[in-house]
Image (cartoon, rainbow, N blue to C red):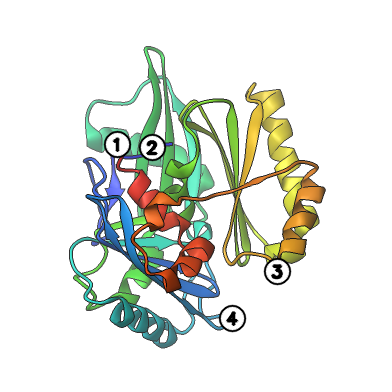
Amino acid sequence: MNWSKWKKHVRSDGRTQAGRFVAPTFALDLEPGFVAAARLNPSKRRVQTVGVRELPAGVLEPSANKANISDSAMLRTAITELCDGLGRVGGRLGLLIPDVAVRVALLQFESLPESPREAEALVLWRMREYLPYAPEEAHLSYQVLLKQPDSVEIIAIAARGSVLAEYQATLEGINAGPAVILPATIALLPLLPEEGGGQLLLHLCPGALTTVVVASNRVRYWRTRALEADPWVNLGEVAREASRVVATCQDNLAVQIENVWVCARPPAEREVEEALANALGREYLPVAAVAASAALPAGQREAFQQYGMPFAGLMANLN
């Protein structure tokens, strides 16, 4: 799915602005347990360099409503080491944050006002039931998925201003802050096939599972769940969640799931992957993007394959 026509996207000052998505030339991806960074070449749609640093447990604990970062000094150190190792941070900076730190909703309207300000106010009013904080504290981003004479369908993302400010503070002094901020799973969507039947994506990160269904280039389902422990020790729950999504899409949305895609960061051992396939009762496909890594030094390709798929998605989104 291509999401390059966002009506609004979050800027470095936390506000939103209209316009087409412009890919960053340097990106950071912050998750519990690790920080990944990449220098990007949007003109060639390539990831030029990539690096990863592990984070001790508890340094980053995502939440849509509470403080996310318990040790900002340690997180800043990991980010600085990555940036120094990959070379000068120039151009537009992109920041990917954990899915748990935002709220995502699929909303339907009879119509949207022509005025961007009025449209944003209406979307935010509808988002209020998904927010564990006052709507006026939210920063909103959305994209129109389907527009018909009597129906408009959108995907909306809201982040609390204080949560965004916390992430931005860790980047103080790095290239004037991020030019665009997105949840990590949004960056993966352009890697899914646009044609054919329903595509189910399972994005597993420490402490969280996001399930997304895309069909006919539209997001039809989205759910992020916080998990008590590593997803790989919750294989049964991951499989049950996937089965629920398949049944929901078939029964309520008339969407048949054609493929199941998995992006797990960090990756699991082979025997654990086989156990997941058995628990799902079907084969799954690993999210991959070979062309995007063609320019990488050999020593960095493993890090890219294990952690860098969202960076590839940022490049694929230019199509």
Q: Do the residues labelled 2 and 1 touch (CB within 8 Å)?
A: yes
Which of the two labelled residues, at mark 3 and mark 4, occupies the earlier sequence position? 4
Which of the two labelled residues, at mark 3 and mark 1, occupies the earlier sequence position? 1
Mark 2 and mark 4: span between their CA atoms? 34 Å
Residue type for callout 4 = Ala
In front: label 2 or label 3: 2
Q: Could you say which disc has been placed on residue 229 in the image?
A: 3
Q: Quadrant of residue 251?
A: top right
Q: In which quarter of the image is residue 153?
A: top left
- Disc 4 target residue: 57
Residue type for callout 2 = Asn
Mark 2 and mark 3: span between their CA atoms? 32 Å
Mark 3 and mark 1: span between their CA atoms? 36 Å
Of residue 68 and residue 73, the one placed in the foreground of this image is 73
Q: Would you say residue 65 is visible in this rendering?
A: no
Q: Do the residues labelled 3 and 4 touch (CB within 8 Å)?
A: no
- Disc 2 target residue: 2
Q: Which residue is drawn at 64% across and 31% down?
A: 258
Q: What element carries label 4?
A: loop
Q: What element carries label 2?
A: loop
Which of the two labelled residues, at mark 2 and mark 4, occupies the earlier sequence position? 2
Image: 298 above or below 45:
below
Local crowd at mark 2 within 10 Å, few (<14), some, or many (≥20)? many
Residue type for callout 3 = Ala
Mark 2 and mark 1: span between their CA atoms? 8 Å
- Disc 1 target residue: 5
Residue 10 appears at what percent x and percent y? 30, 53
Which of the two labelled residues, at mark 4 and mark 1, occupies the earlier sequence position? 1
Mark 4 and mark 1: span between their CA atoms? 37 Å
